[in-house]
Amino acid sequence: MLDILQYLYDHYLVDDHLPDQEALARKLATVGFDQGEIAQALEWLEGLTALDPQAETGLTHDGLRVYNADELNRIAPEGRGFLSYLENAGLLSPYAREWVVERALALDEPEVPADKVKWIALLALWRLGGALSALWLEDLVRGDEAGAPTLH
């Protein structure tokens, strides 16, 4: 499913143009993705619409996020550390962090590795702040894939 989300990010989300789900499902099938994975990815992506840029205004905290047992078991320690890093750097709001945690738990996997947490965080930052504010994170997320950072 992560392959589909990466494809969607590269071809549609960066330009902020996502076709309706039926057209998108046809396009993904034409490209060669499995129907079951397409359905799962589109269902997961539907949660992206719940991430409201207006909802995070005024949400602040000075506390520490404590993960429950299910979150500790399902989200890899490196992924939780990455979220903590983004939040401490002021790049990820508590609202966005909770969305990332929720979407990570919505994946059909026993443990969500850090690379998937990074992609989910990238989608959250793209949705909340637009494509330009997510470009720096794209380099970080794709760093292992491409080698050298992208020059924007």
Image: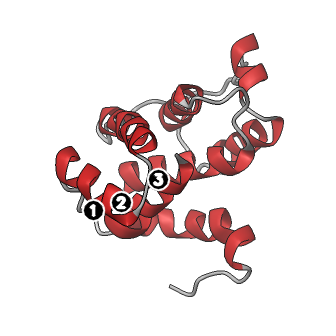
Disc 2 packing (10 Å; few <14; some 14–19; many ≥20): some
Please indicate whether residue 126 sits to the left or right of residue 49 in the image: right
Pick out the residue farthest to the top.
Answer: 69
User: Looking at the image, can residue 138 be seen?
Assistant: yes
Relative depth, front residue between 23 and 139: 23
Q: Residue at x 71, y 83 (%)?
A: 148
CB atoms of marks 1 and 2 within 8 Å: yes
User: Looking at the image, can residue 68 be seen?
Assistant: no
Comparing labels 1 and 2, the label whose residue is closer to the camera: 1
For disc 2, the marked residue is 130
Q: CA distance from mark 1 to mark 3?
A: 14 Å
Above or below: residue 72 compared with residue 58: above
Secondary structure, mark 1, is: loop
Comparing labels 1 and 3, the label whose residue is closer to the camera: 3
Relative depth, front residue between 108 and 72: 108
Secondary structure, mark 2, is: loop
Disc 2 residue type (three-letter) = Gly
Q: CA distance from mark 3 to mark 2?
A: 17 Å
Q: Quadrant of residue 112?
A: top right
For disc 1, the marked residue is 16
Q: Earlier in the sequence, mark 3 or mark 2?
A: 3
Q: Earlier in the sequence, mark 1 or mark 2?
A: 1
Comparing labels 3 and 2, the label whose residue is closer to the camera: 3
For disc 3, the marked residue is 5
Q: Earlier in the sequence, mark 1 or mark 3?
A: 3
Secondary structure, mark 3, is: helix
Disc 3 residue type (three-letter) = Leu
Measured as percent of width and height from the top left, residue 6 is found at 50, 59
Relative depth, front residue between 23 and 107: 23
